[in-house]
Amino acid sequence: MTHGTLNCDDKAANDNFLANVLGLDIIGGGRSSTYVSLPSMGPWYVVVLPTPRREYLGVNSRFTLQPASAEEVANAHKEFSKTGKQLGIQELRDLQENSRVSFILSDINKNF
């Protein structure tokens, strides 16, 4: 496997969300696609394609990001709780503190 694929509604808004809200690196793409990654992902990347009619990626079929520490996760959740709607976050679930600290969100394109 080399990559996963997400769909989006608006390429420009999606690119802004991925880079400026989630902190992902846009590493390529073109007129109709965007490739995003992080240095820690190695050769893996996600392709994002605008699609006018589609099914949204649900909570059980999601991509995950793993920040460096539990504190970073908690801080991100706190910040998204305050500013998430303005940033384009559609839904923000509660912070979970079990053996790990985590939360789930729905992005600007309603993908979890």
Image (spheres, helix red, strand yellow):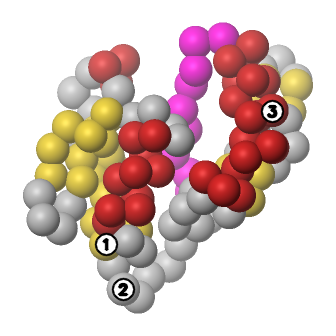
Residue at coordinates 66% horizontally, 11% vertically from top-left? 69
Q: Quadrant of residue 81?
A: top right
Give the CA separation, mark 3 to mark 1. 30 Å
Q: Give residue 50's mark.
A: 1
Residue pointed to by mark 2: 52
Residue pointed to by mark 3: 78
Q: Residue flagged by tag 1: what amino acid is it? A: Pro
Q: Which residues are magenta?
A: 61-69
The secondary element bearing badge 3 is classed as: helix
Question: Which residue lies most toward the bottom here?
Answer: 53
Give the CA separation, mark 1 to mark 2. 7 Å
In primary-sequence order, the first of circles 3 and 1 is 1
Residue at coordinates 53% horizontally, 72% vertically from top-left? 56
2 or 3: mark nearer the eye = 3
The answer to whether residue 38 is visible is yes
Give the CA separation, mark 2 to mark 3. 33 Å
Q: Residue flagged by tag 2: what amino acid is it? A: Pro
Q: Quadrant of residue 3?
A: top left
The secondary element bearing badge 2 is classed as: loop
Q: Is disc 2 surrounded by few (<14), some (14 to 19) or many (20+) residues within 10 Å?
A: few
